Amino acid sequence: MKYANIKKYDVSNGVGVRVSLFVSGCRHHCKGCFNAEAWDFNYGTEFTQETIDEIIESLKPDYINGLSLLWGEPLAPENQEQVWNLIQQVRQKLPQKTIRCYSGFTYEFIEEYMEKNLPYTTKIMDSLDVLVDGKWKEELKNLNLRFRGSANQRVIDVPSTRKYHTIIRALQKEKEKLVQLPLFSKSNLSSLEKVEQKIVEVLEVVA
Ligand code: SF4
């Protein structure tokens, strides 16, 4: 797998301050995609154990809520083995962090087709907190939507959806997790100061 970018203080792709990994390779080819260069599976930098170590180190501060996995397509068959490799190490070392994945595939397609035919899909889905599903649709684009680009995309609470076998939206649960984080402990005060303003902005949006 290759990746295009890692953002270590991202407040645009999920609740709270997050580490975001932008993987390469996407076949959805959504009309108006702002990231067409990353459709190529060979675009960007090789994803290695060193990359995973760097991401885990970046996730450690208390003020980081979790990991977001984004475009190209984290659930493309070619990317799933390394995505799972990353997820399982994050789950082992930092189980308190949330993991959110953006995918152009719908939840139903992932469950009905990918889980039955690909070796890593179920492991990945069993480890996600949130899936934002569906292609980006230019005609449904809405800048007021929270952490998704078009109205067809759903922010799904994956554990609850799998438990109750019906799509359950995630925002309320994420809001509770954010409020529970020890944001104001003395040990992270200096780091906190760097991102405090952004956290306040996010809390205002979520409230
Ligand atoms: S899923 Fe995302 S990266 Fe892929 S084409 Fe659509 S908007 Fe672009």
Image (spheres, rainbow, N blue to C red):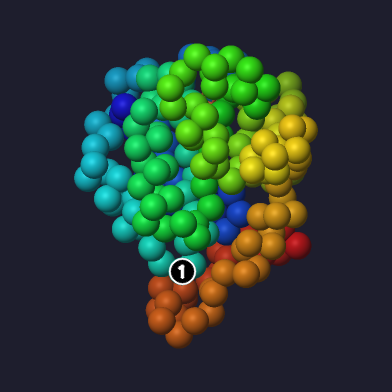
**Residue pictured at 72% horizontal, 50% vertical:** 171
Position of the C terminus by quadrant: bottom right
Q: Looking at the image, which is closer to me, 82 or 164?
A: 164
Location of residue 177 (image quadrant): bottom right
Among the 4 quarters of the image, the one containing residue 39? top left
* Above/below status of 79 relative to 146: above
Residue reaching furthest to the bottom: 186
Which secondary structure, mark 1?
A: loop
The x and y percentages for residue 17 are 52, 58
In the image, is residue 145 above or below residue 114? below
- Relative to 186, say whether 81 is above or below: above
Asked if residue 67 shows in the view, the reply is yes
Residue lying at 55% horizontally and 42% vertically, measured from the top left: 128
Q: Nearer the viewer, residue 189 or 83?
A: 83
Residue 155 shows in this picture: no
Whether residue 72 sits left or right of residue 128 in the image: it is left
- Disc 1 crowd, CA 10 A, few/some/many (<14, 14-19, 20+): many
x%, y% of residue 178? 62, 63
Residue 197 image-quadrant placement: bottom right
**Number of marks in the rendered image:** 1
Which residue position is annotated with label 1? Answer: 62
Q: Is residue 92 above or below residue 160?
A: below
**Residue depicted at 25% across the width and 31% down the height:** 46
Task: Give me the residue at 41% from left, 67% from top.
Answer: 61
Pick the front one: 124 or 29: 124
Q: Quadrant of the N terminus?
A: top left
> Which residue type carries mark 1?
Asp
